[in-house]
Amino acid sequence: MPDLIGHPLRESINLQTFPHRTKFPGENRIFAEMKPRPWLSLTPIAVFLAVYLTSSLIAGDFYRIPVSAAFLIACIYAFCISGGSIADRISHFSHGAGNPSILLMVWIFILAGVFATTAKEMGAIDATVQATVGIIPPRMLFAGLFLTACFISMAVGTSVGTIVALVPLGSGIAAECGVGAGYMAAIIVGGAFFGDNLSFISDTTIAATRAAGCEMRDKFKTNIRIILPAVVVVTGIYLFQGQTAQLVPSHEAVEWVKILPYLLIIILALAGVNVLVSLSIGIGAVAVIGWAGGDFNWEQWLVAAGQGIAGMSDLILVTLLAGGMLEMIRQGGGLDWLTEHLSRGVKGPRGAQASIAALVSLANVCTANNTIAIITTGHIAKDIATRYGVSPQKTASLLDTFSCLIQGLLPYGAQLLMASGLAACAPTDIIPHLYYPMCMGLCAIVAILINARPKSKPSADPTHRT
């Protein structure tokens, strides 16, 4: 049989038509270029979850099974089912792992590890815990930390920056009051997503309002009505649970100078300074104060810095593997297939809002990045909203709220990976205590059910696409 490489008829050749034929030269190249079915490209996510959850249940310990190992198996599976030549697959995976957003997270992990470990070596955590215990009444400690995280995240517009600034402090307090590090980290992570969802300078807010075509102030007014009940309920929960907090005030003098690095990080974050710059300045402050106070010398500081980087190595590997795998899913058409099928069969404004919520939620599961999920599905959400009379501000609120909900519960999301690394616990130790994201999601679902009437006249032809 002649070589059909480049022949117009090669795309019409079907293996099922000639099951017993002899393979012709170049056939492997032809079928290597064929892409798998789009839905199949989504299955690596299921493989990861199945491997991680099943193995953890068998082991009886979610902390024992490395997330990176489960991701490696899922990545190998994604590599096997992806279309294209081996060189193309390697290129796609490397492109995803080397995405600027992924590499930015890697740098944040490295600097956060150095800052947290060197600050601990200097005694900053002990000093900050002593000061916090002395200032906040024990019964208001949990609620106070939650509201502090809400305020900081609202001011800085980033959940990651809030987590970096407060989780080390929360871990130290957890040891003092006898609660798990995962519980204390969950308080701060929950508050961090308050600002991620509402702040005027949050990238998710910017992406959602641009996608939906509304003003930020209009989105804020709609969004705050949806999530305010969740803030009140969660604050009440922490006030109730704080009644049993056992804190023994320290009679030792607080070394206020050792608290300065944490205060500096928070002040720089509130001022809108880039998180990498804030962490670098904080690391420098720790080094100067530690050397001046005799807490460590140059060699000891280097050892502590190296330990901080090593402690983040698993998170770095997970971030790179996830970035590569998710890019292969995108290349396989998984996200496009997902958005197309979720937008079918919508009937009425309630269904339209539910479809928008499901669309951005599933996209977030696949991308592990709420901003990218909003950008990916924004144009389809706007199209659905226009056809069924859902207001732009409600559309933006749904996109932002549900993306933050899913991002806050993903064990392989950047926020939980960061918090678990800084708190020295597993992401699964944090997730059961994430009261705020769960309450936020419940309030958003209720808002869909009780406020589904159209704000504008729907399109006369529901099948019409703008």
Image (cartoon, helix red, strand yellow):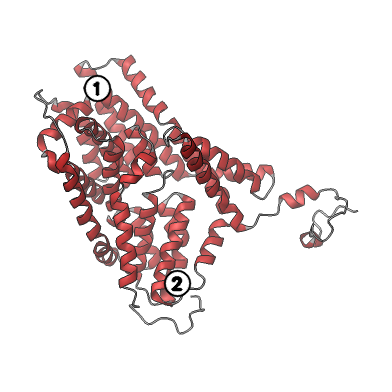
Q: Residue 303, position in %: x, y?
A: 36, 18
Q: Residue 128, position in %: x, y?
A: 18, 31
Q: Nearer the viewer, residue 293 or 159?
A: 159
The quarter of the displayed image where residue 300 is located: top left
The quarter of the displayed image where residue 38 is located: bottom right
Q: Is residue 388 above or below residue 428?
A: below
The quarter of the displayed image where residue 166 is located: top left
Q: Nearer the viewer, residue 63 or 340?
A: 63
Q: Read off the residue under disc 2.
A: 384
Name which residue type carries label 2.
Ile
Label 1 secondary element: helix
Residue that appears at 26% across and 16% down: 296
Q: Nearer the viewer, residue 50 or 123?
A: 50
Q: What crowding class fits label 1: few (fewer than 14 Cα within 10 Å), some (14-19), or many (20 or more)? A: many
Name which residue type carries label 1.
Met
Q: What crowding class fits label 2: few (fewer than 14 Cα within 10 Å), some (14-19), or many (20 or more)? A: many
As drawn, the label of residue 442 is none
